[in-house]
Amino acid sequence: MDIKDWRNQIDELNDEIIALLNKRASCAVEIGKIKKAKGLPVFDSVREQAVLDCISQKAGAANGPLSPDSFKRIFQTIMEETRKVEK
């Protein structure tokens, strides 16, 4: 494969990532509705830390080129942005 082929593959993966992030955000919207109805805060530090710990562990086991810390930072940003749609 040449660079164009690899870039096309990245473009296709970007489309999949966008679809998955929107699907994840849609789930967060529904969770936000439940939290609001129950008077719960949007931010749940215990849950978010558990997610980050799980992501870090899975990333480490995957032995890919991205480090567990890289995934942790990525998911911190995903969760920060998702909290905005939960409100």
Image (cartoon, rainbow, N blue to C red):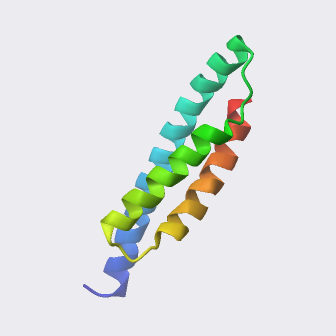
- 45 in relation to 16, above or below: above
Q: Residue at x 43, y 66 (%)?
A: 11
Residue 76, percent across and down? 63, 55
* Residue closest to the far top: 37
Pick the front one: 75 or 4: 75
Q: Judge left or right: residue 20 versus residue 63.
A: right
Residue 65, percent across and down? 39, 77
- 15 in relation to 36, above or below: below
Q: Quadrant of the C terminus?
A: top right
Residue 61, percent across and down? 32, 64
Q: Judge left or right: residue 60 versus residue 29.
A: left
Q: Residue at x 58, y 38 (%)?
A: 47
Q: Quadrant of the N terminus?
A: bottom left
Q: Residue at x 67, y 20 (%)?
A: 35
* Residue closest to the far bottom: 2
Q: Residue at x 56, y 55 (%)?
A: 75
Pick the front one: 76 or 24: 76
- 49 in relation to 68, above or below: above
Q: Report which quarter residue 8 is drawn in.
A: bottom left
Residue 37, percent across and down? 69, 12
How many discs appear?
Answer: 0
Q: Judge left or right: residue 82 versus residue 9.
A: right
- 59 in relation to 33, above or below: below
